[in-house]
Amino acid sequence: MARVATLQYTNSVGQARMRWLDIHDDHHHLSHEPDNNKDAQEKLVKINTWLAEQVAYLARKLKNTPEPGGVGSMLDHTTIVWINELGKGNSHSLDDIPFVLIGGGLGFKSGQALKFDHVTHNRLWLSIADAFGHHIPIFGRKDFCNGGALVLS
């Protein structure tokens, strides 16, 4: 049995305007601006910084909350998976999609940055399923699972 939660701030084509950040353009259209649009890039950095701060806040709260039963913190028994559905919004690229895993719940080694060139994210989901004890051979399209689960520990 696992406790699972999902937190999504907006849908991928949402027209969210982050007015509390003094950004009045919608996030989706900003993400489609060309890389040389410095104003849009600055606003996107501001939005992504705010999102990172929210994830950090959640991780701190979990770290500072004792696990019921007195064995470590809730973060020690949790894995936060923070993702974006695209590597780059203005080209809809599926390359270099950032995935951040935080916490010790699945036994992955923390405190490291890993780069997997030309590896589909299906293999990350296989690794997560494997860590939960579900040793499945494919997740999604079979041709995106070549090589099986990734070694993350």
Image (cartoon, rainbow, N blue to C red):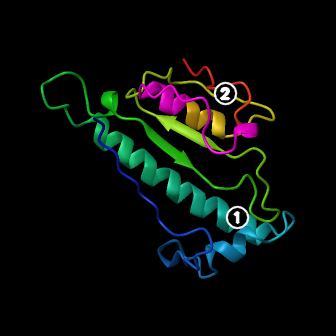
The residue at 46%/25% (across/down) is 131
Amino acid at dot 1? Glu
Residue 9 on image: x %, y %: 47, 65
Is 112 left or right of 132, judged from the image as shown? right
Nearest the eye: 147 or 62: 147
- Residue displayed at 74% across by 29% down: 146
Which callout, 2 or 1, points to the residue nearer the camera? 2
Q: Is residue 73 magenta?
A: no
Quarter of the image for the N terminus: give it: top left
Question: Picture quarter containing residue 140?
Answer: top right
Q: Read off the residue under disc 2.
A: 114
Q: Is residue 13 above or below residue 69?
A: below
- Name the residue located 81 percent from the left edge and 35 percent from the top edge: 118
Q: Nearer the viewer, residue 37 or 124?
A: 124
The answer to whether 117 appears left or right of 110 in the picture is: right
Image location of residue 45, percent across then percent down:
65, 59
State left or right for residue 40 relative to residue 53: right
Residue on which the image places disc 1: 42
Query: Start and end of the magenta stretch?
Result: 127-144
Residue 39 pos. (x, y %): 75, 71
Q: In the picture shown, does residue 65 fall above or below 12?
A: above
User: For the residue carrying disc 2, how many other residues have a C-alpha within 10 Å: few (<14), some (14-19), or many (20+)?
Assistant: few
Percent x, y of residue 65? 22, 37
Question: In terms of secondary structure, where does tag 2 sit?
Answer: loop
- Say which of 45 and 7 sits in front: 7
**Amino acid under disc 2:** Leu
The residue closer to the viewer here, 133 or 41, is 133
- The disc, 2 or 1, on the residue closer to the chain's N-terminal end is 1
